[in-house]
Image (tube, grey):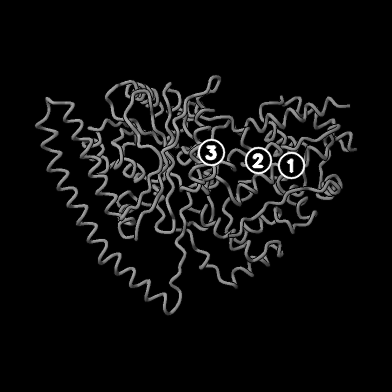
Amino acid sequence: MGNTSSMLTQYDIEEVQEHCNNTFSQQEIVSLYQRFCQLDRNSGGFISADEFLSVPEFAVNPLSQRLFRMIDGLNFKEFVAFLSAFSSRATLQHKVEYIFKVYDSDGNGKVAFSDLLDVLRDLTGQFISEQQRELVLTQVLEEAGYKKDSTLVLSDFMKILGNSGLKMEVEIPVD
Amino acid sequence: MSKVNSSNMELDLDRPNIEDYLPTDSIHEPLGKLRLRDLLDISPTLREAGGAIVDDSFTRCFKSNPPEPWNWNVYLFPLWCLGVVVRYGILFPVRVLILTLGWIIFLSCYIPVHWLLKGHDKLKKRLERALVELICSFFVASWTGVVNYHGPRPCARPKQVFVANHTSMIDFIILEQMTAFAVIMQKHPGWVGLIQSTILESVGCIWFNRSEAKDREIVSRKLREHVEGADNNPLLIFPEGTCVNNNYTVMFKKGAFELGSTVCPIAIKYNKIFVDAFWNSKKHSFTTHLLQLMTSWAVVCDVWYLEPQNMKPGETPIEFAERVRGIISARAGIKMVPWDGFLKYSRPSPKLKERKQQAFAESVLRRLEDK
């Protein structure tokens, strides 16, 4: 009935902990494993689209599709590594890298105007016209010293977001 | 799943203002001029998504309590084995006997009453009501049910409906043994369906099918007709629409609250020490659930009949439903969550996502104006 934490050995937990650079405590990893098994209803070893979208809080999030593409098919170890940016022990560098990865959907290390536009579209939906979105983006980019056709890399993201104190911590329920 | 999506639009009408429940600080309200940093910083939205992945209030409603193993040492284990022997070897056969006896008595009275008294409707109804209450008492005895009823017993009056929180189909049996309610239920297959169409018809039940959207109009008409009938049995409705694990309540459907009648809330709370009465319909069939109950020690629960409520002037049916849900949850000591129970079977409406998008879009545009 989902009470499978007995299937995780101490060795497994340590391996997972190492993989996520010790951002989660051992207890948190056990809780995450229970959650993973709870979501992975057909015990396929990974969480499918259907299973993720059956969590209403996740399905109504504007970035759910984008995040789902990153999390699709991950096994438990990779799932924990994916969530490590949400740990209270995650460094600012780690969080910025994570946000960069969300933008950089093709994974080539560069975020172009179109990528920025895509995310803004996800966040605002039909409530801003495409034209207005482009205008807004161009305007803020130019004010920050970039041009519409410049591509941003990770160091740019670090510069822009580096001193804003990103609040991304999620509490893992530990019973 | 695709045929359920078309009914999503109509299900929308049932949903109260989610914004009242979702944390308002979720989309941050920044001040001052819009900067690149503000557009790139998607951390609040990511945090919400991460939170939902890690734990969410909806899944928690349907989590069965895993039984805590307490038999893990030398002297407790034999005790536990003894317990198993007593439960399966002694209690279970006795209970099966009681239940069989009950069915024999019931059927031998019910069949003659049903067929021979066709002309004498009033007497027939009274006897059938008493017989249904009898068979329910036999069922409750077969799980060694210890039910504490608090509050005034329900009486049959027109223009009133009873609503209760829902944990399992046994809720109905527990309430039915005290008063013969007419109930509105999902039509089930198998032997349950057979009982539904024969015996429960006599107390006046209404059937619905969750996946049929058109069904709702027919059902609400039937509800209205039933409530207005003077000598119909009092109507019992479970407005959550699905079984929840008795630690939370999900949003009440407004159907029971817009009939223009008095609503009498009933709160049911099971004592989990003895058995977890939550029927996880995705995990087991009702038969397995009943067998599980019959091989446990007891089913202990409290039933509170609460003060009848009327819609206040200026209150919408949805607000009325939520107010009654608050009363029931407070009495039973369980928490409320802002989700629609039918999300177990379908996806949330796109409107919820759109509201978030709208809020963010408006704040972007507003800050653009700030110079």
Amino acid marked by disc 3: Trp
Residue B234, located in which quarter of the rendered image?
Answer: top left
Q: Is A151 above or below relative to B236?
A: below
Assess disc 1: are there few (<14), some (14-19) or many (≥20) residues with their C-alpha within 10 Å of its C-alpha.
Answer: many
Q: Give the residue at x 64% y 30%.
A: B355
Which corner quadrant of the image does residue B349 belong to?
A: top right
Seen at 66% across and 30% down, the residue is A125
- Left or right for B80, reference B336: left
Pointer 1 residue: B42
Q: Both on one chain, marks 2 and 3?
A: no
- Of the pair A76 and B275, the residue shown nearer to us: B275
Which residue is at a point 28% across and 65% down the rendered structure image? Answer: B88
Q: Secondary structure at mark 1?
A: loop
**In contact (CB < 8 Å): disc 3 and disc 1:** no
Q: Say if mark 1 contacts mark 2, CB within 8 Å.
A: yes
Taking depth in this image into account, of B366 and A153 the one nearest to the observer is B366
Residue of label 2: A63
Mark 2 element type: loop
Query: Pointer 3: what residue?
Result: B339
Q: Quadrant of the N terminus of chain A?
A: bottom left
Q: Using the image, name the chain to which the residue with label 2 belongs.
A: A
- Name which residue lies at 41% across and 78% down: B75
Q: What's the chain of the residue with tag 3?
A: B
Helix, strand or loop status at disc 3 = strand
Alpha carbon of mark 3 to alpha carbon of mark 1: how far? 25 Å
Q: Earlier in the sequence, mark 3 or mark 1?
A: 1
Report the mark closest to the observer, 3 or 1: 3
Q: Which amino acid type is marked by label 2?
A: Leu
Which quarter of the picture shows residue A90? bottom right
Please name whichever residue, A43 or B116, is drawn nearer the observer in this view of the structure: B116
